[in-house]
Amino acid sequence: MPEHASVVALIDRIVAGARIPSRAERDDLRRELEAHFEDAGTSEEAAREAIRRFGEERVVAGALRRVYRWDYRLLYVAKIAACLAASIGVAFFIEAAANLRVGREHDSLALAPGFAHAIVRATALVLAFVVAREALKPPLAWRRVTLGLCVYACVCGVVELTFANGAVAFVIAATFVALGALGSMRHRAPARWLLIYGSFVAVTAATHVNIAFGPMRTLLASAVTLTIWASTSAVAARADRLFVNLLESAG
Amino acid sequence: MEYDREFLTGTVGVLILSLLAEREMYGYEILREAERRSARTFQLKEGTLYPALHQMERDRLLKATWRESAAGRQRKYYGLTAKGRRRAASKRRQWISIAGAMRAILGHAHA
């Protein structure tokens, strides 16, 4: 590769590796590094020597990443917050649609009595999904996994302290997410969805053994859970793409 | 001469603050000036200068502006802020004190 192309590629990699959320600051760094290599000389030999003197790009990008780490973390937290808000909003509408009932007088619509519980369950499912997705993202980092588990356990604890037995919804949600993740490992779409739906039906049935729930309601509740699971997955994937685009958009 | 990294750790900040205390400079100029004055003792891995400059800018020790250099090219010039000037003076005092103490110790050991 000609040395000038190597310089451009090196600058690109350093700017990308610095993970600077602000486009203006990213452009500023790129311009500054371009000026550095321009000052070092325009001949092929000078460019080669400048690359050698510049040092390891991994070290430079890592040092820049440390400088801008709080901006990055802020953007990351904003991404998770936006993802949670959007997913919970979608889940709310799904649950509202599933719990809409015709009133006793047949002239009005009302939400089923179990709607409040359904919302808690849906919120728990969204939270479990987003936490698991972020915590287990490759490359696997145990610090991230531990942090994810701690965040989820803390929310569980707060819910349990606020509402008696509220944490049960979070344990069930974690089970749904684990089964959904296992089912997602299947590559073929029909088999994947059937497997996930089947496992959701089994969990829903198992968690309603003590109350009269009936097979139709079990199937319907599982379908609602699957829809929320799928919508959260779609929202999270969209949020990830936006996040990456924000960090990588070229100057 | 090759130096242990531990000797050079912490010197980059002092070096930047001291050079910029005299006048505004851009990255490449700082590197060449440090190299020239130290008779090439300070031959940093040049890429390490930029994270240090950006960190100091974030810490409000430096302020940066793009303007034309003597060669007619746009360059990002760094200068000290009031906080940077105070930090530069403090670092300078500390460094002179440490250097004096080390010289005394090494001189004794040599004698």
Image (tube, coloured by chain):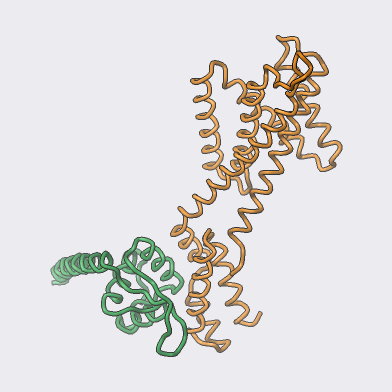
Chain colours: A orange, B green
Give the residue drawn at x 33%, y 84%.
B36
User: Between A168 and B100, which is closer to the camera in this rendering?
Assistant: A168
Q: Residue A66 occupies which quadrant of the picture?
A: bottom left
| Vertical order, B82 against A173 (above or below) | below
Whether residue A81 sits left or right of residue B5 in the image: it is right
Q: Residue at x 35, y 71 (%)?
A: B3
At 60% from the left and 45% from the top, the residue drawn is: A140
Q: Report the number of numbered marks.
A: 0
- Front one among A232 and A136: A232
For the C terminus of chain A, give its image quadrant: bottom right
Question: Horizontally, is B95 left or right of A98 in the view?
Answer: left
Q: Position of residue B78 (x, y in %)?
A: 36, 74
Q: Nearer the viewer, residue A163 or A187?
A: A163
* Quadrant occupied by the N terminus of chain A: bottom right
Quarter of image, res B45: bottom left
Residue A99 appears in the rendering: yes
Residue A28 on image: x %, y %: 49, 70
